[in-house]
Amino acid sequence: MIYQGKAITVKPLEGGIVELNFDLKGESVNKFNRLTLSELRAAVDAIKADASVKGVIVTSGKDVFIVGADITEFVDNFQLPDEELMAGNLEANKIFSDFEDLDVPTVAAINGIALGGGLEMCLAADFRVMSATAKVGLPEVKLGIYPGFGGTVRLPRLIGCDNAVEWIASGKENKAEDALKVGAVDAVVAPEQLQAAALDLAKRAVAGELDHKARRQPKLEKLKLNAIEQMMAFETAKGFVAGQAGPNYPAPVEAIKSIQKAANFGRDKALEVEAAGFVKLAKTSVAQSLIGLFLNDQELKKKAKKYDEVAKDVKLAAVLGAGIMGGGIAYQSALKGTPILMKDIREEGIQMGLNEAAKLLGKRVEKGRLTPAKMSVSYTHLRAHETGRNLVCRLLLEK
């Protein structure tokens, strides 16, 4: 074993090729928290110090590759002074750059989801092999920031400015075939063939059949666009993305500005530009709000999962007070196959709720998301209380 930690191990495979494996103990997924970054630093140093290493394969011991940075650490990190936050970001980037600068060929074997820092780790490798079922992306703009581990620097130099802008500004997850089409990965294979394909690629690079230094060189240089091409690409992109994102979500446009500012710089200077823009966005109220929403959503999902384990099947639901809002609630319940009673003191309220539910169900039929056969709404007046003034509507979506 060349290196062994709690998140990363490096072990020899064959022919001088070693496996750098991410497998964060005690977690269901891999993520770049302080521990993982620290161990990546140590693992890279261990590989550099071992003269017997001829190639590196990067793998994951989880069902996913790496889901990105540990967002729970953002809250404290983003409270740091600008200079300290930027210094920390550049120090993390130095780890990725040192991995990229290894004298031996490197191959990332992407077995599952690789998002944010996970994809940025792959971009630092010379070659990337992807499972047909995996997905990759840079979703940081959804948190009010943009990629901070070299994503705005390496991706446009690998797949071109236009493709990189689309990936980064949209924050979307990309399927394997789409990643292959734009050149983000070098090969797509069946999941069971991933390890063998990555090892074969590494062997070919070690044997000199593939020039790994030539493959990494574009990532170290400035973008291959002249001044006119840059103006056309970036100004058009900024105008379009600004119209799509609106004035309250600055991250997508700021990402394009960062790519543009760094276009004429080599990797190291470009990473400084990225870091400066990242710190600027990290301090915005938009980022703070979106990160807060994300963390709250994750906490709710954890609690919901616990309740779901002990919950019993719901055989009948009810909503007190019909109308448009009650109809919307009834629609959601009925859509999930749970019968629901709408109750209101006014008959017109019941009718309004029923009409709203029927309208929403009808829209799903129009869009092909629901068959007419499954859209069955029954309306029945029942006595609810002795006064006789309460009416109950039963809304049932038949399966």
Image (spheres, rainbow, N blue to C red):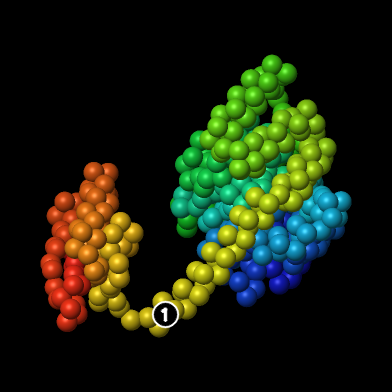
Residue appearing at x 24%, y 50% in the figure: 359
Vertical position of residue 171 compared to residue 2: above or below: above
Residue appearing at x 80%, y 34% in the figure: 266
* Mark 1 secondary-structure assignment: helix
Nearest the camera: 57 or 62?
A: 62
Left or right for 55, reference 379:
right
Image quadrant in which you'd find residue 314: bottom left
Vertical position of residue 385 compared to residue 258: above or below: below
- In this figure, what is the number of numbered marks? 1
* Quadrant of image for the C terminus: bottom left
- Indicate the position of residue 216 as horizontal and vertical percent values: 72, 38
- Indicate the position of residue 338 as horizontal and vertical percent values: 26, 69
Nearest the camera: 148 or 79?
A: 79
| Any part of residue 367 in sight | yes
Vertical position of residue 316 compared to residue 142: above or below: below
| Any part of residue 182 in sight | no
Badge 1 amino acid? Glu
Residue appearing at x 50%, y 69% in the figure: 301
Vertical position of residue 19 compared to residue 159: above or below: below
Nearest the camera: 48 or 278?
A: 278
Image quadrant in which you'd find residue 118: bottom right
The furthest residue to the top: 228
* Quadrant of image for the N terminus: bottom right
- Indicate the position of residue 343 as horizontal and vertical percent values: 24, 70
Left or right for 24, reference 382:
right
Residue appearing at x 28%, y 72% in the figure: 318
- Indicate the position of residue 47 as horizontal and vertical percent values: 79, 58
Q: Which residue is mark 1?
A: 309
